Amino acid sequence: DIALYEAKKRGRGRVEFFTDGLRAQVVETKQTADDILRALEQGEFVAFFQPQFDARTRDIDGVEALVRWEHPERGLLAPDAFLRIAESLNVMHRIDEIVLDQALFHLRQWQAAGLAIPRVSVNISAQRLLEGGLLEKIEDLRFDPGSLCFELLESISFEDDDDAVLNTIERLKALGVDIEIDDFGTGHASIVNLLKLTPRKLKIDRQLITPILDSQRERQLVSSIIDIGRTCGIGIVAEGVETMDHAALLSDMGCQTLQGYAFARPMRAADFLAFALAHESRPENGRKRA
Ligand code: C2E
Ligand code: MG
Ligand code: MG
Ligand code: MG
C-alpha cells in the first residue's frame, strides 16, 4: 500500500529528525551544565553594570548589576544562554552570590573614588531568596542601609510560598535592603500582593516601554502605572529606554528613573567608573558642585 508506505516514511523521517534535534539539544544542555559547574570553580561569572538615571536631573541614581559569563571558548555570554540551565542545576544562588559580592565590592570602590552613586541593585532569584541562606549572608555583609537593592521578578515573588517570601523580605528590610519589583506588567502577581512587599520601586518592563511613542494604549498603561506609584508612594523605573524621545516622554509623564541603551549599555566595572566620572563632570550634571 503506497499511501501507508509514504506515511510511514514521512512519520519515520519526522521521528528521526525530531530525535536528532532533541539529541543535539540534550547534548548542548548537558555540556553547558558541566561547563557552568566548571565556570563556578574558575570564577568566570562577572557582574556588568548599567546605570539608572534620575529622570528630572539626569544624574546617575543607581546602577543595576547584570551577570555575564566570560566563557573561555564561547566568549561573553548573556544570561539568556545559561540562567535557565543554572536554575535547573540548583546553582542560581551561587551565581547570585557572586554577583552580590562583586556589586558591593565595586560600589564601595566607586564611592571611595568620589562618585555619587547612591545604590546598587542586584537581581535575586526565587531560589536565592528562599533557599540560599540569604539572610545569614546579608547579616555578615557591611553596607549602608538603602545602598543595596534586590530586584525581584513579579512572576516569581508569590509562586511558591507567600509567607516564606513575605517573612524573608521583612527580615531583609530590617537589615537595610530595599526591594524593587522587576519586569512589572508581565507577571501575574496581584497589586495587593505586590504592595505587601512595600517595594521602593516598580520597574516597568521593556515590553510596555518600547511602544509608548506609537501606541496610545501602552502610553496610557504606563501613565496609569506611574499614577499607581504616586498614589502608593512607590517610585517608578522605566527599563529598556532605547531612545531620547522615550526618555523625554517618560520624564514628562512623571516617571522618576530611566534605564536603557539610550543612556548606556551594561558594562564592566572599570568602564562604568569611567562612564560615571565623565557623566558627573558634564557641566549640566553639577549635582555635587552646585
Ligand atoms: P532584567 O533584570 O529585567 O534586566 C534588564 C535586561 O534588559 C538586561 O538584560 C539588560 O541588559 C537589558 N536592557 C537594558 N536596557 C535595555 C535597552 O534599552 N534595550 C534592550 N533591548 N535591552 C535592555 P540581560 O543583562 O541579558 O539580563 C536578562 C535577565 O537576566 C535580567 O532581566 C534578569 O532577570 C536576569 N539576570 C541578570 N543578571 C542576573 C543575576 O545576577 N541574577 C539573577 N537571578 N538574574 C539575573
Ligand atoms: Mg533586573
Ligand atoms: Mg527587568
Ligand atoms: Mg527581564
Image: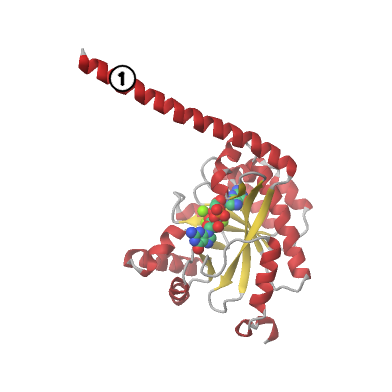
Report the side of 246 relative to 51 (left or right): left
Residue 143 in the image, given as x and y percentages of width and height? 75, 61
Which quadrant of the view contains residue 53? Answer: bottom right
Residue sitting at 42 percent across and 63 percent down?
Answer: 210
Residue sitting farthest toward the bottom: 290
Which percent across, then down, holds residue 59? 61, 76
Q: Quadrant of residue 11?
A: top left
Residue 75 in view (yes/no): yes
Q: Is residue 196 above or below residue 212?
A: above
Foreground of the two, 264 or 86: 264
Rendered view: 163 above or below 24: below
Circle 1 residues within 10 Å: few <14, some 14–19, many ≥20: few
Q: Percent position (x, y) of residue 129? A: 63, 46
Determine if residue 204 is in view: no
Ligand 1 resides in the quarter of the picture at bottom right
Depth check, front residue: 220 or 285: 285
Amino acid at pointer 1: Lys
Residue 3 figure quarter: top left
Q: Which one is in front, 129 or 31?
A: 31
> Residue 130: percent from the left, percent from the top?
63, 42
Q: Look at mark 1 in the image and give the residue it sits on.
A: 9
Q: Report the residue at 46% width, 55% height from top.
A: 191
Locate the C terminus by quadrant: bottom right
Which residue is pictured at 68% across the width and 37% down the height?
37
Q: Nearer the viewer, residue 173 or 1?
A: 1
